[in-house]
Amino acid sequence: MGELRMSMLVDTFNRAHRDLRVSITDRCNLRCTYCMPPDFSDWLPGDHLLSVDELLLVIEVATEQGIENIRLTGGEPLVRPDVVEIVRRVKALPLAPKVSLTTNALRLTELAQPLADAGLERVNVSLDTLDRERFKTLTFRDRFNDVIAGIEAAQRAGLTPLKVNAVLMRGVNDDEAIPLLRHSVANGWNLRFIEQMPLDAQGSWERAEMISAAEILELLSAEFDLVAVPTRGSAPAEEFTVDGGPMTVGIIASVSKPFCAACDRLRLTADGQIRNCLFARDETDVRATLRDPSITEAERRDRIARLFASSVLAKLPGHGINDPSFIQPDRPMSAIGG
Ligand code: SAM
Ligand code: SF4
């Protein structure tokens, strides 16, 4: 069924949208330096976060418009107590999408199996270092062992292929490119390096500090035989087989080699705003429609569908990070949903 479904969310550049990233909370139990400062407290008001029923209605309407993949994210999606219920109910929708989740893995030890039982297909785990002390410095929490245990729990629960996302920072963890890949290959993790983007809450991103995809490739090529895998489609990562395969490594060049022309993603923030790009300056408010007591349920659905359509029609050709006029979005990654 999924293959045959028509996307009604086609933008003015002929990009059909099939992927919706849904942030279910902006809260987090880590403080990764490239994401938020250690004393971050600018959380969304609790009553602005969408309820499970509200999330389900938006996701259901999105599937009716051709969305086939839902990725739950945040903030940290696993700090939301009803995350298993969300997965179970999304998988029970008439046009059930594929559901995956991006997480820091801290709560996976207890949640991997219930999530798999609820129908979750895969997880992406974020991990930037293999060193416990460095993990503490990078995240302001001494939770490295929980991440490793969480990854193992995900593998046991069959949430595979398990992808691990790493952000390299100059002089901080760029000496770990090779060890991270070696460890990933040995443990069956699909490692992907992501270029650091200007999305931190403190606005301290500097282009010169970013380790570019070209640099990452050069670093890794000193140790591994990497061969580009030709098919990329709308996937953001450029994939390479490692030492003849079958394991691969991905490099996501969001800044230095944007993949906007093939973008098929939309985002829903935890407080019910549709964003047509991570770097969008404008948002489309669905929360007001979800909470409007003066309309019927049929009208509500119809309005949500129109809001998706209007957001897609307003989508720009690219994120513009490399334009001189680029301005970092007002919201940090944790509030948009990474
Ligand atoms: N808390 C979950 C996690 O860390 O996986 C999900 C949300 S997090 C915002 C999603 C992804 O965004 C993570 O892989 C994280 O490394 C990445 N990320 C956060 N800030 C970033 C930045 N400034 N540049 C690049 N990636 C970033
Ligand atoms: Fe939390 Fe993920 Fe941001 Fe790290 S990257 S602070 S785990 S939301």
Image (spheres, rainbow, N blue to C red):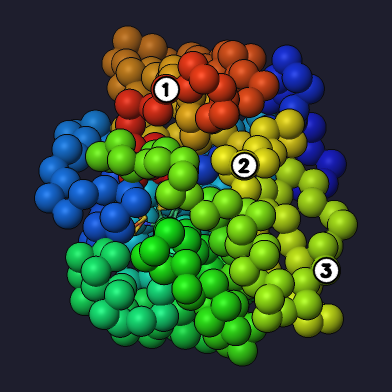
136 is higher (above) or lower (below) than 28: below
Secondary structure of the residue carrying numbered label 3? strand
Q: Residue at x 49, y 16 (%)?
A: 325
Residue at which label 2 appears: 256
Name the amino acid type tagged 3. Answer: Val
Q: CA distance from mark 3 to mark 1?
A: 36 Å
Residue at which label 1 appears: 327
Q: Are marks 3 and 1 in contact (CB under 8 Å)?
A: no
Crowd tier of the residue under label 1, counting other residues whose Cα lies within 10 Å: few below 14, some 14–19, many 20 or above? few
Of callouts 3 and 1, which one flags the residue occurring earlier in the amino acid sequence? Answer: 3
The percent coordinates of residue 322 (x first, y second) are: 57, 29
Of callouts 2 and 3, which one flags the residue occurring earlier in the amino acid sequence? Answer: 3
216 is higher (above) or lower (below) than 330: below
Residue at which label 3 appears: 227
Q: Residue furthest right?
A: 230
The answer to whether residue 264 is seen in the rendering is no
Name the amino acid type tagged 2. Answer: Ser
Decide if residue 208 is on the left or right side of residue 62. left
